[in-house]
Image (cartoon, grey):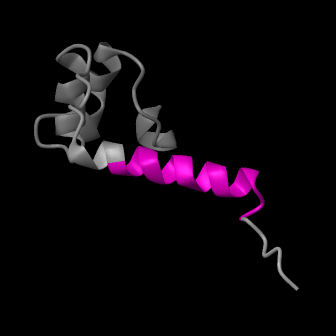
């Protein structure tokens, strides 16, 4: 079924039986990762702080309607 629809196999048995997830298949690595157990979270990097700060600034600007000019 996954060969026809392109869907990701839902079970380990289906992964083993699907050609694209086989030993030489293009999606082999994905199959290995799925079967190796739960994933791991990425570690935080200095960029997370900058990205979070940028989002806060954007929210603040939107909340204040981007500080429209008050002069004549």
Q: In the orientation shown, which residue stands out farthest toward the front?
A: 71
Residue 41 x, y percent position in the rendering = 26, 25
Camera-side residue: 59 or 20?
Answer: 59
Camera-side residue: 49 or 8?
Answer: 49
Q: In the image, what residue occupies the spot 29% across and 15% down?
A: 12
Q: In the orientation shown, which residue stands out farthest toward the right?
A: 72
Magenta-colored stretch includes residue 51: yes
Taking the image as shown, residue 23 lies to the left or right of residue 7, namely left
Magenta-colored stretch includes residue 23: no
Tag count in the figure? Answer: 0
> Does 68 appear above or below 28?
below
Quarter of image, res 19: top left
> Does 22 appear above or below 66?
above
Query: What main secondary structure does the magenta stretch of the protein show?
Result: helix
Taking the image as shown, residue 55 lies to the left or right of residue 17, namely right
Q: In the image, what residue occupies the spot 45% across and 43% down?
A: 6
Residue 44 x, y percent position in the rendering = 24, 34
Quarter of image, res 52: top left
Camera-side residue: 31 or 63?
Answer: 63
> Does 4 appear above or below 64?
above
Residue 10 x, y percent position in the rendering = 42, 20
Q: In the image, what residue occupies the spot 75% across and 55% down?
A: 64
Q: In the orientation shown, which residue stands out farthest toward the left?
A: 23
Numbered range of the magenta stretch: 50-66
């Amino acid at each position: 079924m996954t060969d026809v629809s392109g869907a990701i196999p839902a079970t380990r048995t289906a992964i083993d039986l699907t050609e694209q997830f086989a030993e030489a298949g293009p999606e082999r690595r994905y199959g290995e990762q799925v079967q190796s157990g739960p994933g791991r979270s990425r570690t935080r990097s200095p960029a997370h702080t900058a990205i979070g700060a940028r989002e806060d600034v954007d929210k603040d600007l939107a909340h204040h309607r981007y500080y429209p000019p008050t002069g004549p």
